[in-house]
Image (cartoon, helix red, strand yellow):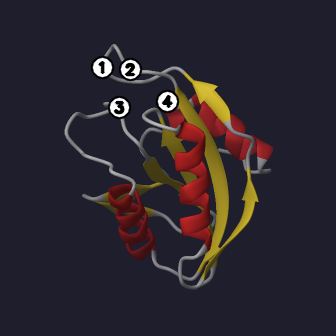
Amino acid sequence: MRDTAYVALGSNLGDRDAQLRAARARIARLARTRVVAASAIEETAPIGPPGQGAYLNQMLAVETELAPSELLAALHAIERDAGRERTVRWGPRTLDLDIVMFAEQRVDEPTLCVPHRELANREFWRRQLAELGVAA
């Protein structure tokens, strides 16, 4: 099934611009997937433990034939390749990739919930989705 996924990109460690640029390129090279639109990049305050630097965030609209679980696995591989370590919840990270929504699909599984459970709490995600013409 071909669908449009909305993928949030974020980084607050290292060269944040380069992290987002590399993530966009890797996502664009995923099998049976193409990036169809991207929001502007914006800087946001961190959510989570104090002492973190600001994040750069962006939303991509990605047309894909991958199942949600396949897309999530591919995004996790991109994060790992970027040096992402999952040690502290909402802690600092080189790269954070989240499936925020699919246009046509809903998922409610222990490892993946689409729409993302935090969508209502992320004003910047809703702004970025609106920029892409999507109501959250």
Spot occupied by residue 97 in the image (x, y as percentages of width and height)? 46, 52
Res. 52 mark: 2
Task: Classify residue 92 as left or right of residue 58.
Answer: left
Mark 2: amino acid = Gln
Q: Residue 102's mark?
A: none
Total marks in image: 4
Decide which of 38, 128 is in the foreground and name it. Answer: 38
Amino acid on which the number 4 mark rests in the picture: Asn
Comparing labels 1 and 4, the label whose residue is closer to the camera: 1
Tell me whether the residue at label 2 lies in contact with that at label 1, contact meaning CB atoms closer than 8 angstroms.
yes
Of badges 2 and 1, nearer the viewer stands 2
Residue 73 vs 88, above or below: the answer is below
Label 3 to label 4: alpha-carbon separation = 18 Å
- Which residue is the site of mark 3? 92
Report the Cα–Cα distance between label 2 and label 3.
Answer: 6 Å
How many neighbours does mark 3 have within 10 angstroms: few (below 14), some (14-19), or many (20 or more)?
A: many
Q: Which residue is mark 1?
A: 49
Mark number, residue 121: 4
Q: Quadrant of the C terminus?
A: top right
- Give the mark nearest the N terminus, 3 or 4: 3
Relative horizontal placement of residue 34, taking residue 1 as reference (left or right) = right
Give the percent coordinates (x, y) of residue 56: 57, 34
- Under circle 3, the secondary element is loop
What's the CA distance linking mark 2 and mark 1? 7 Å
Earlier-in-chain disc, 2 versus 4: 2
Q: Nearer the viewer, mark 3 or mark 1?
A: 3
The residue at the point 46 percent across, 32 percent down is: 12
Q: Residue at x 56, y 67 (%)?
A: 27
